[in-house]
Amino acid sequence: MSERQQLLELLRQQSYEQRDVVLSSGRRSNFYFDGKQTTLHPYGALWVGRACYQALERFPGPVQAVGGPTLGADPMATATVMVSALEGNPIPAFIIRKEAKGYGTGQWLEGRKNLPPKARVVILEDVVTTGGSSMKAVTKAQEAELQVLGVLALVDRQEGAREYLQEQGVVLESLFTKEEVVG
């Protein structure tokens, strides 16, 4: 079984649930993806890191950093930068806070000192639905003078994120779609 297939099986086992939930978009759904259950798994982290690192080739290079909204993007970004270092092409990570730091510098973005000025970045997301949280992350990154090349999601729920982001001029790539995970 390929590493991609192993990652897909882990997603199915650890991250996918049939149950009624309210999503961060406010929508109700009869299924849920909890990407962190996969990205925090030892093999999941390795496989996600490798898959994300390889997927960076889909964006116009060079990609100089990866990161996204805490908490979903944190393990993905860490795994991706670890793989980048092992591949001899170290790419730093950053984290976009849910709200500005309430003390000290008051910043939204962590890891700034590791990034070159006007860094070319890819926003990572564990799961995208409507694209709203991805667009907020893109906006915060742009306000920090980063050049956003696009968004890379572990899973696209296929509920409008791709179309919404495209309307905003932002490319969405995903490692898997809902259709692939659910089967």
Image: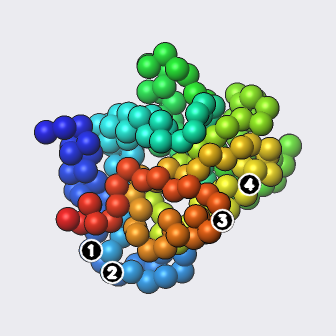
The quarter in which the C terminus is drawn is bottom left
Task: Please indicate whether residue 177 sits to the left or right of residue 112 in the image.
Answer: left
Q: State which quadrant residue 83 falls in.
A: top left
Gap in angstroms between the C-alphas marked 3 and 2: 28 Å
Extreme-left residue of the structure:
1
Q: State which quadrant residue 6 falls in.
A: top left
Labelled pair 2, 1 in contact (Cβ < 8 Å):
yes
The one of 7 and 172 positioned closer to us in this rendering: 172
The answer to whether residue 14 is visible is no
Element at label 2: strand
Q: Name the residue under label 3.
A: 168
The one of 46 and 37 positioned closer to us in this rendering: 46
Gap in angstroms between the C-alphas marked 1 and 3: 31 Å
| Residue 88, position as x, y percentages in the image | 49, 16
Q: Residues within 10 Å of mark 2 (few under 14, many from 20)?
A: few
Labelled pair 4, 1 in contact (Cβ < 8 Å):
no
Q: Earlier in the sequence, mark 1 or mark 3?
A: 1
Q: What residue type is labelled 2?
A: Asn
Element at label 4: helix
In this rendering, the answer to whether 153 lies above or below 162 is above
